[in-house]
Each structure stands twice: as structure tokens, then as C-alpha cells.
Image: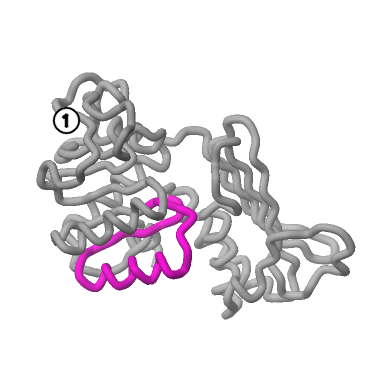
């Protein structure tokens, strides 16, 4: 039995993960963690997720019950705190938190020398297949093509561009042997001049209850290729996170992503 801890248990992703875990054989929710002061502290995690009482109250202390894998969809500060804890305790992690800085990523990389971590901007199986297709397209079309990444999410999303949009841009940049930080264009306003060759543009929409939509446009003279992914249910991401947790349970320390989990690398 794989014991699962869920950080951010009261959030939409946390509740989805609890729901999926309850329907999977060989998995058990052992910890449900929320920030101190949350009005969900003490509420049964199953009741919170709408699957009935599972005997695991939501708490604000990660060190309540033993667990094998922590699934993390919170914020950068909480994530790094949990990374340090898991590193000390030798626990595996699935990290889906977005909005992390490069320095945060380096801390995760250092921790992965001692524990196994799946770190991915998007846990969706479909998105990760899309990333592979983007690499193929970028390699075939070359740097002469104009690339634009357009993404849309619900009005409550706080980071922009989304982690998935950045991962898509990185997939293209890597295929070109370039660094996204050097060629990404994240703002356009006023007289900005003509498009810079070899750049990757980003456009962001925040509206309503959009779960997540991403399109990468490869525009040439006379034709255009568009590769899109649209999510309509957060269970898509939760299923991927659970698949990653199962996969991690038998892995040695290292930093992995969903491409590794799905055997696409």
C-alpha cells in the first residue's frame, strides 16, 4: 500500500487528488495538509473532497502520519518548505506547483540528489504528449518559423504565463538549442517594431472558469501549424499526478518529469 500525503488539500487540485486516490487500488491518503488558519483544519479530507469520510482530518502539520509520496500543488513558499522536510525524511515528492523562480528550481534539483522527485508544470498525459510533438515540430520547421504560445486559464490563476505555457516554450527553445530566457517575448505594448527572428511570443488570457487551454502556433509564409491542448476537467491533472506517485514509489533518487513517467524520453 502506497501512503499518499496531499499538500493543498482544500484546493481544487488537492480535492481532485483525494477523489482519484480513493478510487485507486493500492493507494491510501495518510495526510491532508493545509495552511495554518485555514477554516478546513479538522474537516475530514474525504468529506472535503465529496467522497465521504476517510478518517483523515485536514491538518497544518506535515509530520502527522508516515507517508511514502507527497503530492504538492500549493505555492512556492510552501513547496520549498515541504521539499526540505521530505529531503530530511527521505520521502518522495510529486511537485505540480507553478510560479517557481530559477533559485527555487535549483533547491529542488539539489534535493533530488537525495530523494526521488517528479517535477512537472503540468501532470496531464495529453499535455506531455503535446510537449513531445512540439519538439518534433520545432526541430522540423527550424528557427525561421514564427512561434507564438497562447494560453487561457480561469480568472483566479495568479501566475502568468502559466507553467505549462512556459514548458511549451522551453520545449521549442530546447529543440532549437536555445535558452527560453534569451528568446522569449512576454510583453508587447506600443511601438515595439517588427517581430524578432527566432523569438517565441507569449499571450495570456485570464477569464471565467477556464480550466486550461494552450495553443502553440508555428507560422510560415503561406501556411500555419497549430498544436493545441484543452483541458475541461481537473481530474486530468489529478490522474497524472497519481500515476506519477505510483511510478515514483520504485525509483531511486533523481529529478524526473512526466516525460519520464510516460516513457516518452
Residue 138 image offset from top left, x and y in percent:
62, 69
Q: Please, is residue 208 above or below residue 224 in the view?
A: above
Q: Please, is residue 218 above or below residue 46 in the view?
A: below
Residue 128 image offset from top left, x and y in percent:
46, 55
Total numbered circles: 1
The residue positioned 88% from the left and 69% from the top of the image is 193
- Name the foreground residue: 24 vs 72: 72
Please tell me whether residue 114 belongs to the stretch shown in magenta. yes
The residue to which callout 1 is attached is 56
Q: Residues within 10 Å of mark 1 (few under 14, many from 20)?
A: some
Residue 135 image offset from top left, x and y in percent:
55, 67
The residue positioned 49% from the left and 51% from the top of the image is 127
- The stretch of residues the image draws in magenta is 96-122
Q: Please, is residue 61 above or below residue 104 in the view?
A: above
- Coloring basis for residues: one colour
Judged left or right of residue 48, residue 215 is right
Residue 247 image offset from top left, x and y in percent:
24, 55
The residue positioned 60% from the left and 77% from the top of the image is 176
In the picture, the quarter occupied by the C terminus is bottom left
Secondary element type, mark 1 = loop
Amino acid at each position: 500500500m502506497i501512503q499518499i500525503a496531499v499538500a493543498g488539500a482544500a484546493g481544487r487540485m488537492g480535492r481532485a487528488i483525494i477523489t482519484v486516490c480513493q478510487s485507486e487500488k493500492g493507494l491510501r491518503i495518510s495526510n491532508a495538509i493545509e495552511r495554518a488558519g485555514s477554516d478546513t483544519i479538522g474537516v475530514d479530507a474525504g468529506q472535503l473532497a465529496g467522497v465521504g469520510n476517510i478518517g483523515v482530518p485536514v491538518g497544518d502539520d506535515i509530520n502527522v502520519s508516515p507517508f511514502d509520496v507527497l503530492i504538492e500543488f500549493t505555492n512556492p513558499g510552501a513547496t520549498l518548505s515541504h521539499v526540505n522536510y521530505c529531503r530530511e525524511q527521505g520521502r518522495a515528492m510529486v511537485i505540480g506547483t507553478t510560479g517557481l523562480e530559477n533559485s527555487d528550481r535549483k533547491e529542488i534539483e539539489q534535493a533530488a540528489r537525495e530523494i526521488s522527485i517528479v517535477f512537472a508544470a503540468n501532470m496531464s498525459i495529453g499535455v506531455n504528449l503535446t510537449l513531445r510533438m512540439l519538439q518534433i515540430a520545432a526541430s522540423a520547421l527550424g528557427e525561421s518559423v514564427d512561434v507564438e504560445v497562447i494560453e487561457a486559464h480561469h480568472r483566479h490563476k495568479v501566475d502568468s504565463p502559466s507553467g505549462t505555457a512556459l514548458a511549451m516554450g522551453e520545449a521549442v527553445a530546447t529543440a532549437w538549442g536555445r535558452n527560453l530566457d534569451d528568446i522569449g517575448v512576454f510583453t508587447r505594448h506600443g511601438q515595439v517594431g517588427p517581430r524578432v527572428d527566432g523569438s517565441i511570443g507569449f499571450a495570456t488570457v485570464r477569464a471565467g472558469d477556464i480550466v486550461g487551454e494552450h495553443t502553440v502556433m508555428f507560422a510560415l509564409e503561406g501556411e500555419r501549424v497549430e498544436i493545441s491542448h484543452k483541458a475541461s476537467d481537473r481530474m486530468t491533472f489529478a490522474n497524472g499526478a497519481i500515476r506519477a506517485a505510483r511510478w515514483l514509489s520504485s525509483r531511486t533518487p533523481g529529478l524526473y518529469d512526466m516525460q519520464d513517467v510516460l516513457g516518452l524520453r
